[in-house]
């Protein structure tokens, strides 16, 4: 039968707590910088739409931006990448928490 160390559950839980808090901070950081991002989008839109620069291709965050929609898409794409990373880290943290709880339950039944 599988032998489970009783000290494993608290460590799994603590690891899950730490990872979950890190994910929360990452997601909060992204939300807090939404206002600053809007200001950046407005500034970059003025630059992209300037008459003198109409023939120049502007690349923002790897996206060619020709107008306001292109600029906004570049910043939304960056923000969605952060949100995806935060969600993945959050799921990993919850996985560790769940593993800790399962180890506790299995240990009590042995």
Image (cartoon, rainbow, N blue to C red):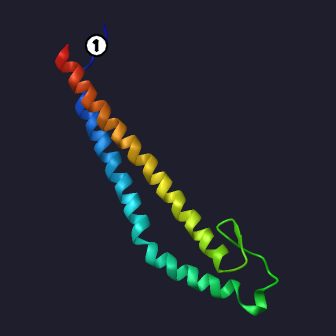
Q: Is residue 51 above or below residue 87?
A: below
Q: Is residue 19 above or below residue 51?
A: above
Q: Dot 1: within a 10 Å radius of its alpha carbon, few (fewer than 14), some, or many (20 or more) residues? A: few
Residue 6 visible (yes or no) = no
Instruction: Specify the quadrant that holds the C terminus.
Output: top left
- Indicate the quadrant where residue 67 lies: bottom right
Task: Give the side of residue 8 with respect to residue 76, left or right.
Answer: left
Secondary structure beneath dot 1 equals loop
Q: Position of residue 51 (x, y in %)?
A: 76, 92
Q: Is residue 28 above or below residue 100?
A: below
Task: Give the side of residue 33 with respect to residue 69, left or right.
Answer: left
Work out which residue is located at the far bottom of the displayed protein and give it.
Answer: 51
Residue 85 visible (yes or no) = yes
For image coordinates 77% across by 87% down, the residue present is 53
Instruction: Specify the quadrant that holds the N terminus.
Output: top left
Task: Give the side of residue 68 with respect to residue 94, left or right.
Answer: right
For image coordinates 54% across by 58% down, the residue present is 81
Q: Which residue is mark 1?
A: 3
For image coordinates 52% across by 64% down, the residue present is 79
For image coordinates 71% across by 90% down, the residue present is 50
- Indicate the quadrant where residue 17 lies: top left
Q: Is residue 60 above or below residue 98?
A: below
Q: Position of residue 35 (x, y in %)?
A: 44, 78
Work out which residue is located at the far right of the displayed protein and give it.
Answer: 55
Work out which residue is located at the far front of the displayed protein and give it.
Answer: 69
Q: Position of residue 93 (x, y in %)?
A: 36, 43
For the image, the number of numbered tags is 1
């Amino acid at each position: 039968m599988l032998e489970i160390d009783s000290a494993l559950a608290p460590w799994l839980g603590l690891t899950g707590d730490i990872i979950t808090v890190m994910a929360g901070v990452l997601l909060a950081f992204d939300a807090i910088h939404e206002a600053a991002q809007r200001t950046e989008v407005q500034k970059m839109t003025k630059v992209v739409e300037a008459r003198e620069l109409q023939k120049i291709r502007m690349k923002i965050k790897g996206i060619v931006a020709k107008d306001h929609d292109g600029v906004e898409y570049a910043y939304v794409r960056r923000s969605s990448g952060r949100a995806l990373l935060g969600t993945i880290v959050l799921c990993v943290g919850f996985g560790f928490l769940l593993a800790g709880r399962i180890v506790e339950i299995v240990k009590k039944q042995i």
